[in-house]
Structures are given as structure tokens and as C-alpha cells.
Image (cartoon, rainbow, N blue to C red):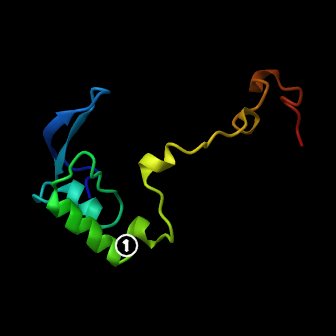
Amino acid sequence: MALGKTVTVIEEDVDRYARVVGAVILPDGRNLNREILAAGLAWWYRQYAPDDTVARILESKARKDRRGLWAEADPVPPWEWRKQDHARPRSNLRRSEPRSQRRDQGRRR
């Protein structure tokens, strides 16, 4: 919806990591934050916006219609997912030798 378009960001806050928190307004005037919530592609963070009745309604409708992440049987909220251990052994992430030092470098197969 926003790719390649000029959007307007209405700054609402700055978080503890100095990131701007705000509403992204599309060129046609729609609120991107609301659009992705309605499509079931985002969670409503009640902790940060407990009185946002529009967000509550949009998320409830997306859940009811099983759109986006609500199509999953048991979606895990990001704040819960971050608490889980997702560590993988480092050997699965990269090779032990730099490419330039591998013994098979330059061999044809």
C-alpha cells in the first residue's frame, strides 16, 4: 500500500530506542496503521493504546473473520514470542572457514 509512495507520518511519540512512533497516512488519506490492523497483519498493543476503540474494533473484526495472522489456530503475540528461546546452534548459521580458505576452492565438480 505504501511501496514507492510518499506518505505522511504523524509523530505521536518517540520510544526508548529513539524511534518515531506514529500514524502513517497514505496519499489517499487512509491510515496505514489501521489498514494493516484491519487486514489481520498486525496486533493491537493494548499496553500502549488501551483506549483506542477503533483499533479494538478493527482487530476484533479481523479475528472474527480469521484474516491474516488470525487464520492461525493459535497465533502467538510478538511480546510473548520474544520471551521464547529461539536460539539456533551457530554451526547452522554460517560455515566455519571463510570462503577464501576452503580446501575445495577452485575445484571443478
Q: Can you give x and y, in whole percent of width and height, for residue 19 in the image? A: 27, 31
Compared with 71, 35 (above or below) is above
Residue placed under numbered mark 1 in the picture: 67
Q: In which quarter of the image is residue 71?
A: bottom left
The residue positioned 28% from the left and 66% from the top of the image is 59
| Residue 57: % across, % down | 21, 68
Tell which of 29 and 46 is nearer to you.
46
Instruction: Give the quadrant of residue 68.
Output: bottom left
Q: Which residue is drawn at 26% across and 32% down?
A: 15
Vertically, is 44 above or below 69? above
Image position, residue 95 (x, y; %): 76, 32
Say if 12 sits above or below 71 in the image: above
Please name whichever residue, 17 or 96, is drawn nearer the observer in this view of the structure. 17
Q: In which quarter of the image is the C terminus?
A: top right
Q: In this view, does 34 lie above or below 105?
A: below
Q: Where is residue 61 in the image (x, y as percent from the top left)?
A: 27, 73
